[in-house]
Image (cartoon, rainbow, N blue to C red):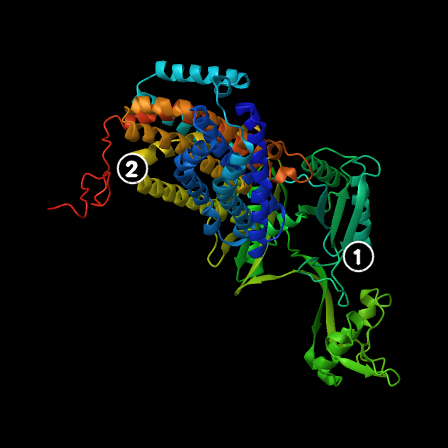
């Protein structure tokens, strides 16, 4: 940008030197605060590079302006620093202020975006210090003094000089009624924001196109392990038909519940019975470069066609998705609780039917198996007593036949040779217990073939819940659903309507949502509150500095353009409003406000210092600050462009951040250069230049009274 606008290779070298210094300083402070280098801190550092360039660029550009006035290099450097030191401090504070939402967030969003905000803040502070200390020293060592007219107006910048003169002339000639212009500006931005907020979807995080995905497969309830395993193998083969040959790099499956001796914690891998399995697939994206979401849709149709008896749903596999889901199996989870499981299941079935009518919901089902086939053994205690049996005797025999004594009778054996302790257990081999008739003929007394189980008990086949979830005194069931082709915000409204359409729940039944659906509403609220706090902080800070409420209003009038521009680019790129794009909007607000401060502060200097009329002060400030505003915007856009394009693995996760910044900066730059001068001249046309300060020691105050003056 320095080369493009100033034609100064030495100045460009100075700017480039400040970038690694600021980033290294930020990394050191992040280390001291216990942060690590991860995708969020790297995003923060990438986001701050454009702002880092701005800090040094503004200093170099202002030095050039003063040198073009014919000043010697040391004087030009000093005057340039004194002129912009306060505005640059305001710019720094404005950008730091827009990072306050990270401190208002709670839970997972705060854990994710606090590192990003800290990275930006530390890099900004380091860059500000470098631009006020290192840059002037390097400028004095490296930059050349301009002594003649040719140096003051180099041929390299002839085009830009013509552009600036033409811009100043057009601004002076184009002077529409400011009130009408402001009204049309606000109406246009307001209409764009209202319309696009209805069109642009909302999500917690952008959809990842990672080649890894996970499917939870549920065969018909009560299926044996070998049958479930066979179905899983068939589904794996069907998935392979949807992608090029050898497209599956890794497939991993777990069928049935974890055995007692398994080291797998059910928190990380849970299956409720022998009919349930979890299948993980890794796709070679060099062979298959298409959309993973589209591939999932094809897999759904193939499984539904080939295995209509199988229930299944895709689950999050990426670490970020799992964290955002807070343990939920799908983005949408509706839980129905009741004192009795039957009542909860009946009402959940109504919600399930309503959700199935929504065209963009997939994998809608109730996850808990409530009709698992079992054998119910009803013991006749009178008959058992006649045989001299107790319930403990009967239970002990059944435990040995159906499970193991390790759960009911802990027995340890010490090896006399090695001294090692072993746990011993008694269990009838599973292959022997292969039929209901075996259980009926199970002996109950040691050393006797009679009585058998059938003599004292009645066996019958029934269905019972295979999994019972509890929350407090209630039991609950879960209705899950995935999304295809829609954002989570739209789905959230549809799910709420489906719950309402299910009718008033009976007494004692409670309904609530979990997973990313709940996280979305919580995060959106905290972001909006944080943004409002940031705007109020900026307004109060600017009001205190300028001792006026009008000047901050002029500066903050750029905000509608920022939001509208960000929404337009998000809509054009088919992106959603998510945590990343929200942070992009917030950062573009900070940079846009800083550019507006740069122009308005100069206009205030001309109005108060040179006693120019507001209209002339605004036009002159716009002309003198045209180059730094364009340079800072261009530098920021150049820094965000690779991120917005989404180059590299996992880049789609941070692309909305760059797109939001680009849209907001383009709109705000146009507003600052074309509209802000008119707003300034209109709002301050009748404002006096006298300071409103009541401090008698303030020389600019009307109430100034020197200490030694007589009363």
Tell me how far mark 1 sits from mark 2, CA to CA.
73 Å
Mark in front: 1 vs 2: 2
Residue 180 position within the rendered picture, expressed as x and y whole percent measured from the top left: 31, 21
| Residue 674 falls in image quadrant | top left
11 sits to left or right of 225: left
Which residue sits at x=82%, y=73%? 427
| Foreground pick, 508 / 674 | 674
- Along the line of sight, which residue is nearer the eye, 22 or 656? 22
The local secondary structure at tag 1 comes to helix
Sequence-wise, the earlier of marks 1 and 2 is: 1
Q: Quadrant of the N terminus?
A: top right
Number of other residues with Cα within 10 Å of mark 2, as a class: few under 14, some 14 to 19, many 20 or more: few
Residue at mark 2:
549
* Residue with the mark numbered 1: 225
65 vs 123, left or right, is left
Q: Specify whether 134 is left or right of 235.
A: left
């Amino acid at each position: 940008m320095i080369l493009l606008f100033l034609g100064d290779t030495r100045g460009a070298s100075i700017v480039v030197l400040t970038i690694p210094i600021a980033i290294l300083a930020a990394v050191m402070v992040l280390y001291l605060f216990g942060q690590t280098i991860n995708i969020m801190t790297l995003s923060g550092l990438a986001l701050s590079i454009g702002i880092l360039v701005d800090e040094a660029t503004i200093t170099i550009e202002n030095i050039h302006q003063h040198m073009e006035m014919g000043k010697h290099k040391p004087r030009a450097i000093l005057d340039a620093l004194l002129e912009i030191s306060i505005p640059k401090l305001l710019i720094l504070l404005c950008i730091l202020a827009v990072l306050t939402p990270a401190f208002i967030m709670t839970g997972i969003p705060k854990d994710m975006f606090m590192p990003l905000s800290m990275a930006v803040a530390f890099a900004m502070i380091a860059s500000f210090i470098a631009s006020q200390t290192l840059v002037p020293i390097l400028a004095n060592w490296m930059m050349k003094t301009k002594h003649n007219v040719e140096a003051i107006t180099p041929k390299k910048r002839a085009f830009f000089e013509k552009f600036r003169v033409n811009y100043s002339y057009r601004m002076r000639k184009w002077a529409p009624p400011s009130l009408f212009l402001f009204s049309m500006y606000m109406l246009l931005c307001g209409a764009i924001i209202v319309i696009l907020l209805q069109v642009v979807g909302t999500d917690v995080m952008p959809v990842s196109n990672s080649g890894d995905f996970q499917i939870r497969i549920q065969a018909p309830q009560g299926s044996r392990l070998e049958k479930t395993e066979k179905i899983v193998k068939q589904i794996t083969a069907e998935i392979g038909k949807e992608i090029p040959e050898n497209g599956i790099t890794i497939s991993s499956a777990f069928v049935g519940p974890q055995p007692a001796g398994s080291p797998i914690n059910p928190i990380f891998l849970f299956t409720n019975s022998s009919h349930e399995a979890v299948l993980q697939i890794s796709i070679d994206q060099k062979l298959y470069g298409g959309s993973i979401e589209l591939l999932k849709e094809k897999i759904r149709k193939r499984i539904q066609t080939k295995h209509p008896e199988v229930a299944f749903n895709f689950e999050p596999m990426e670490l970020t998705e799992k964290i955002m889901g807070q343990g939920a199996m799908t983005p949408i989870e509706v839980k129905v609780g009741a004192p009795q499981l039957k009542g909860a299941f009946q009402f959940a079935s109504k919600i399930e039917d309503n959700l199935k009518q929504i065209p963009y919901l997939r994998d809608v089902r109730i996850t808990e198996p409530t009709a698992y086939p079992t054998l119910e053994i009803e013991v006749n205690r009178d008959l058992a007593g006649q045989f001299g049996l107790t319930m403990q005797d009967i239970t002990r025999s059944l435990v040995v036949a159906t499970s193991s004594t390790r759960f009911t009778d802990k027995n340890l054996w010490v090896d006399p040779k090695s001294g090692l302790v072993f746990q011993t257990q008694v269990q009838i081999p599973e292959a022997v217990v292969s039929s209901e008739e075996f259980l009926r003929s199970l002996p109950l007394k040691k050393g006797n073939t009679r009585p058998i189980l059938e003599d004292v008990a009645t066996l019958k086949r029934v269905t019972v819940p295979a999994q019972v979830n509890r929350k407090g005194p209630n039991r609950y069931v879960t209705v899950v659903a995935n999304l295809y082709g829609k954002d989570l915000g739209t789905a959230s409204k549809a799910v709420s309507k489906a719950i309402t359409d299910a009718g008033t729940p009976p007494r004692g039944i409670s309904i609530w949502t979990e997973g990313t659906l709940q996280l979305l509403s919580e995060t959106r609220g905290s972001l909006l509150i944080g943004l409002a706090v940031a705007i109020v902080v900026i307004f109060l800070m600017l009001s205190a500095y300028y001792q006026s409420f009008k000047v901050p209003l002029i500066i903050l009038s750029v905000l509608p353009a920022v939001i509208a521009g960000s929404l337009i680019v998000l809509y054009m790129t088919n992106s959603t409003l998510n945590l990343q794009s929200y942070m992009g909007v917030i950062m573009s607000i900070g940079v846009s406000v800083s550019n507006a401060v740069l122009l308005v502060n100069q206009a205030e200097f001309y109005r108060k210092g040179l006693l120019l009329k507001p209209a002339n002060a605004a036009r002159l400030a716009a002309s003198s600050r045209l180059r730094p505003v364009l340079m800072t915007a261009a530098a920021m856009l150049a820094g965000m462009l690779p991120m917005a394009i989404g180059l590299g693995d996992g880049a789609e996760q941070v692309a909305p951040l760059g797109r939001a910044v680009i849209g907001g900066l383009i709109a705000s730059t146009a507003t600052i250069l074309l509209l802000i001068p008119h707003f300034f001249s209109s709002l301050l046309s009748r404002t006096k230049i006298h300071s409103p300060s009541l401090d008698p020691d303030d020389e600019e105050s009307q109430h100034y009274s020197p200490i030694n003056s007589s009363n």
